Image: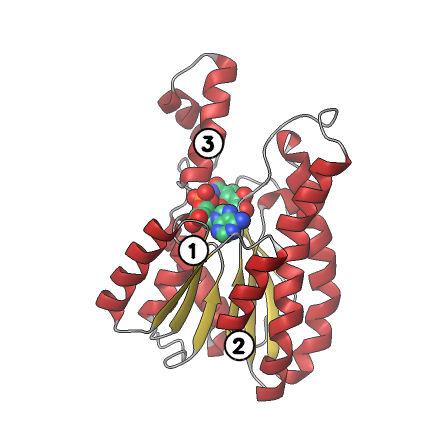
């Protein structure tokens, strides 16, 4: 299927690894030029080189922490006029409801709510002027059903979801769509660190922790960054222009919901 994205330009935040990289790869495969970002330059430059070589697209890199005002300024400057925005950043640490103080919430809100909002505020106007744009926010299945140990994520991402629900309907008349992708467990470094926590807590091996988690998922496995990226590219496609303000779960059936 031709997604109709050849020659478009996208910013993909936090994209040297994991789900962000999956989105960057899938867009590059459709002929989309990229602005890629991650905190460390090494993995970022390596992946940018690979995507240039594999897909012949232009890739600009900005190595910085996207949750800081300085980092946001650098990335927004590089990404002026993009057609597609994919927001992403690392997730908050696990813990218990009784662990977190105001500062912990401020950090989580900054990373997983206010950062994507800052990018939308900066980059939506030029999409609206052009009459075409796509925003995909990487959130979490924790928005549909809370994950007990990820209370900071539950809170911050639900705030973003409320913002998107209202904003998506205000920009849709200009040909711009905003949707959220909600990952369940995917095989990335983030999953490794969550599984390492379970392994330490239960005194089992990392492989046993992974197998235990996979057994709870109807698909009986973790998702891949390629599957995730393909869904992101579809949401950015010409064919997805009537999908507005939706929250798409990619979780192998893990969240037990009728709708
Ligand atoms: P990951 O740890 O595998 O990859 C993180 C990527 O983001 C790396 O490229 C890293 O450099 C970059 N990054 C992290 N924080 C950054 C920052 N502040 N500024 C710039 N770059 C930054 O993570 P992932 O598994 O790809 O997860 C992506 C998002 O999806 C996270 O918010 C995570 O909490 C969420 N999520 C992941 C899963 C999963 O199973 N992998 C499930 C639900 C939600």
| Identity of the residue drawn at 39% across and 37% down | 221
Q: Is residue 171 visible?
A: yes
Taking the view exactly as shown, the residue that stands out farthest to the top is: 203
Which residue in the structure is indicated by mark 1? 15
Judge: label 3 CB < 8 Å from ligand 1.
yes
Residue 148 horizontal side relative to residue 1, left or right: right
N-terminal of the two: label 3 or label 2?
2
Q: CA distance from mark 3 to mark 2?
A: 34 Å
N-terminal of the two: label 1 or label 3?
1
| Identity of the residue drawn at 38% across and 17% down | 205
| Identity of the residue drawn at 53% across and 80% down | 81
The answer to whether residue 83 is above or below residue 110 is: below
Element on which disc 3 rests: helix
Which residue in the structure is indicated by mark 3? 193
The answer to whether residue 182 is above or below residue 104 is: below
Q: Nearer the viewer, mark 2 or mark 1?
A: 2
């Amino acid at each position: 299927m031709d997604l109709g994205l050849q020659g478009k330009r996208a910013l993909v935040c936090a994209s040297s690894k994991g789900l962000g990289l999956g989105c960057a790869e899938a867009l590059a495969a459709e002929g989309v030029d990229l602005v890629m970002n991650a905190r460390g330059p090494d993995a970022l430059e390596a992946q940018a080189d690979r995507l240039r070589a594999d897909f012949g697209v232009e890739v600009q890199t900005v190595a910085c922490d996207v949750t800081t005002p300085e980092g946001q300024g650098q990335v927004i400057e590089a990404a002026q006029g993009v057609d597609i925005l994919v927001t992403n950043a690392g997730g908050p640490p696990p813990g218990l409801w009784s662990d977190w103080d105001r500062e912990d919430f401020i950090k989580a809100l900054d990373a997983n709510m206010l950062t994507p909002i800052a990018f939308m505020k900066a980059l939506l106007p030029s999409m609206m002027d052009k009459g075409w744009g796509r925003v995909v926010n990487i959130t979490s299945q924790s928005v549909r059903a809370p994950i007990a140990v990820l209370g900071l994520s539950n809170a911050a991402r639900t705030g973003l979801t409320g913002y998107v629900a209202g904003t998506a309907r205000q920009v849709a008349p200009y040909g711009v769509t905003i949707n959220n992708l909600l990952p369940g467990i995917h095989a990335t470094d983030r999953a490794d660190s969550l599984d390492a926590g379970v392994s330490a807590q239960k005194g089992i091996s990392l492989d046993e922790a992974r197998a235990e988690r996979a057994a709870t998922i109807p698909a009986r496995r973790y998702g891949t960054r390629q599957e995730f990226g393909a869904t992101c590219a579809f949401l950015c496609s010409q064919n997805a222009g009537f999908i507005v303000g939706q929250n798409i779960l990619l979780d192998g059936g893990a969240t037990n919901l009728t709708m």
